[in-house]
Image (cartoon, grey):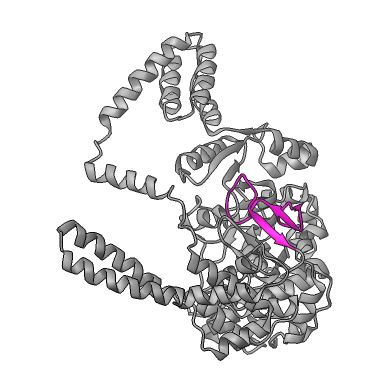
């Protein structure tokens, strides 16, 4: 059983880790003065606002507000818990991790779920052992090697073989005293008419399916005997830890590459993903036999805004690509198509033509959706026949009219005009007619919808509120208090209170933590904060401030904050004075003026 990671080990990892080295694996950083800057990996931007300070070992994005230490970064990038992030950072720095510190997965709090995760992990190890180390697995190993899947790839994807034995796995877990209730919940077993359990997967090459964090949550088994009457692939049923609508095959391995390449390649089959991975195309994923779901699209949207479809090049594959393009209408993404030549699937193409040609296809052969769709239409018509020419032209215009870019429209109008030997002017006239027809068919927006749309557009562009004098004082005072224990003691002795709740919460956490004298302690302090607290701490620590404070400066900050209530009263009275003047109430104006004079004397200390 794993034990809690001791604070001493966390401190060791913190002290031996340079945040710039770790973050450089995910973000292209360049030196900018004392700091490093790059494009934020958490949101799309054109001007770098993601800043890393090597001196203080923090990161902060001045655009989206995310910030923290190296563990916070790994937790957000890799969807890991804090203990998992510590272990991951230690691995990156080649820092030895004692077995007793290895963390059990805490993403699944339910005890049954943790048991199932352990079962799937042990099952994968068992099947992998059978594949590589036993005579039972020799035929499966030959099959994989014949498909150019070598031992390195087998190890990377933990491939295995389930032998043609109905109770090998069942007995394996019974020997470990796993209850029958858990065995039934696992999805690793089926039952016969008498209600007796037997191994679900038999005589199949086993491909583990992982969640985004890399935990094995399911299997896909491929049959070896092509003449068998059973299905070519068999997938695990849904369980407490596996939902096919949420999982994408190979996402845990591909995440870093997806970010680096700024696109994800959607393959049709697991073997295509494996073959592409071996050839150096490591940003590929595959869905679980269905079109991409909303949950899967949301997951991908955190990694990229470009999806390239690379399905089989045969007729069924082309049809599947067309269906996918008509279904993928999520505006967070742009889409492309990588068409595999000679009616081959990606795996066949790589094995016959080589990795270099496939890499070139991926890099240089991405079509726009409209280009693929026009080619798709061409497949269905005899363009030497005038009747088919008109049908092709009409279908093409139905797609071109959906485009918003004038340049794109002009380009594809030109292509169709040249191919059909008609003028661009006549096609553009047809497009104008089509637009008018479509506009008539569309229901008119009611006034309320127009207003809502306008409001959303305007509020989306509203600049954030500027920091007022009081909040600026709070931020600066808290900045100095984080670094100088004597200020913390002074504020604590006077029962000082910050005005805004977020600064007060951070201040109270600091009081509970104790003094901070170095970066390791600052990182340790951050580890105990909630997500908002981490973001705020990183923002404050990375403020541009002098090396030392002055007593007058601190006195002014404290005075501003303490008098914030008086300033609010002054503002309220000024508003009341305006209203009294508007209605001509001289008596009320005099009373309010006297109150205002008293408040201003209190503010100035006179």
100 within the magenta span: no
> Residue at 77% of width from left, 66% of height from top?
55
| Numbered range of the magenta stretch | 25-53
Residue 87 in percent (x, y) is at 73, 75
Residue 57 in percent (x, y) is at 73, 68
Query: Foreground residue, 66 or 219?
Result: 66
- Hey, which quadrant is residue 533 in on the image? bottom right
Q: Which quadrant holds the N terminus?
A: bottom right
Query: Foreground residue, 492 or 410?
Result: 492
Query: Foreground residue, 412 or 14?
Result: 14
> Residue at 46% of width from left, 77% of height from top?
605
**499 up-or-down from 513: above or below:** above
Would residue 106 be visible to someone looking at this image? yes
On screen, residue 422 versus residue 65, left or right, reads left
Residue 398 in percent (x, y) is at 40, 26
Residue found at the very far front of the displayed protein: 606
Residue 500 in percent (x, y) is at 46, 74
- Hey, which quadrant is residue 251 in on the image? bottom right
On screen, residue 537 versus residue 127, left or right, reads left
On screen, residue 174 versus residue 568, left or right, reads right
């Amino acid at each position: 059983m794993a034990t809690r990671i001791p604070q001493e080990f966390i401190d060791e990892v913190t002290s031996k880790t340079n945040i710039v080295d770790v973050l450089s694996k995910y973000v292209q950083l360049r030196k900018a003065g004392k700091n490093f800057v790059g494009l934020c990996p958490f949101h799309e931007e054109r001007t770098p606002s993601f800043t890393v300070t090597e001196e203080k070992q923090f990161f902060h994005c001045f655009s989206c507000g995310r910030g923290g230490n190296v563990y916070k970064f790994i937790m957000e990038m890799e969807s890991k818990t804090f203990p998992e992030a510590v272990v991951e950072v230690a691995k990156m720095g080649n820092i030895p991790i004692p077995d007793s510190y290895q963390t059990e997965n805490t993403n699944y709090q339910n005890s049954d779920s943790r048991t199932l995760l352990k079962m799937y992990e042990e099952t994968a190890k068992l099947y992998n052992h059978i594949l590589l180390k036993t005579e039972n697995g020799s035929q499966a190993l030959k099959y994989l090697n014949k498909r150019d899947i070598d031992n390195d790839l087998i190890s990377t994807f933990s491939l295995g073989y389930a032998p043609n034995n109905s109770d090998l796995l069942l007995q394996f877990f019974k020997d470990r005293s796993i209850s029958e209730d858990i065995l039934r919940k696992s999805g690793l077993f089926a039952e016969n008419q008498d209600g007796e359990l037997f191994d679900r997967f038999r005589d199949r090459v086993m491909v583990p399916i992982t969640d985004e964090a890399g935990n094995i949550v399911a299997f896909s088994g491929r049959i070896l005997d092509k003449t068998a009457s059973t299905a070519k692939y068999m997938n695990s049923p849904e369980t407490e830890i596996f939902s096919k609508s949420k999982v994408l095959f190979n996402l845990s391995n591909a995440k870093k590459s997806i970010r680096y390449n700024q696109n994800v390649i959607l393959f049709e089959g697991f073997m295509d993903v494996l073959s592409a991975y071996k050839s150096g195309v490591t940003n590929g994923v595959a869905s679980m036999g269905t079109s991409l779901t909303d949950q899967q699209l949301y997951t991908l949207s955190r990694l990229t805004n470009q999806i390239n479809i690379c399905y089989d090049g045969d007729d069924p594959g082309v049809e599947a690509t067309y269906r996918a393009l008509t279904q993928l209408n999520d505006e967070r993404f742009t889409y492309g198509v990588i068409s595999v030549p000679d009616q081959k699937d990606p795996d066949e193409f790589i094995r016959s033509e080589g990795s270099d040609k496939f890499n070139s296809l991926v890099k240089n052969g991405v079509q726009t959706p409209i280009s693929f769709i026009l080619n798709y239409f061409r497949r269905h018509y005899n363009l030497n026949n005038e009747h088919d020419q008109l049908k092709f032209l009409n279908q093409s215009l139905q797609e071109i009219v959906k485009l918003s870019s004038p340049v794109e429209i002009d380009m594809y109008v030109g292509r169709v005009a040249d191919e059909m030997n008609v003028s661009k002017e006549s096609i553009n006239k047809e497009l104008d007619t089509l637009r008018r027809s479509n506009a008539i068919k569309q229901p008119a927006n009611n006034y309320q919808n127009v207003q809502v749309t306008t409001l959303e557009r305007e509020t989306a562009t509203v600049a954030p509120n500027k920091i007022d004098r009081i909040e600026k004082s709070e931020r600066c005072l808290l900045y100095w208090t984080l670094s100088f224990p004597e200020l913390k003691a002074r504020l604590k002795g006077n029962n000082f209170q910050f005005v805004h709740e977020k600064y007060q919460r951070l201040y109270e956490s600091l009081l509970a933590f104790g003094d901070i004298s170095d970066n390791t302690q600052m990182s340790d302090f951050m580890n105990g904060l909630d997500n908002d607290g981490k973001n705020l701490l990183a923002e404050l620590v990375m403020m541009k401030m002098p090396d030392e404070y002055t007593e007058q400066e601190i006195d002014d900050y404290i005075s501003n904050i303490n008098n914030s209530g008086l300033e609010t009263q002054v503002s309220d009275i000024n508003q009341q004075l305006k209203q009294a003047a508007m209605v001509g109430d001289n008596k009320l104006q005099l009373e309010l003026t006297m109150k205002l004079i008293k408040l201003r004397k209190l503010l100035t200390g006179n």
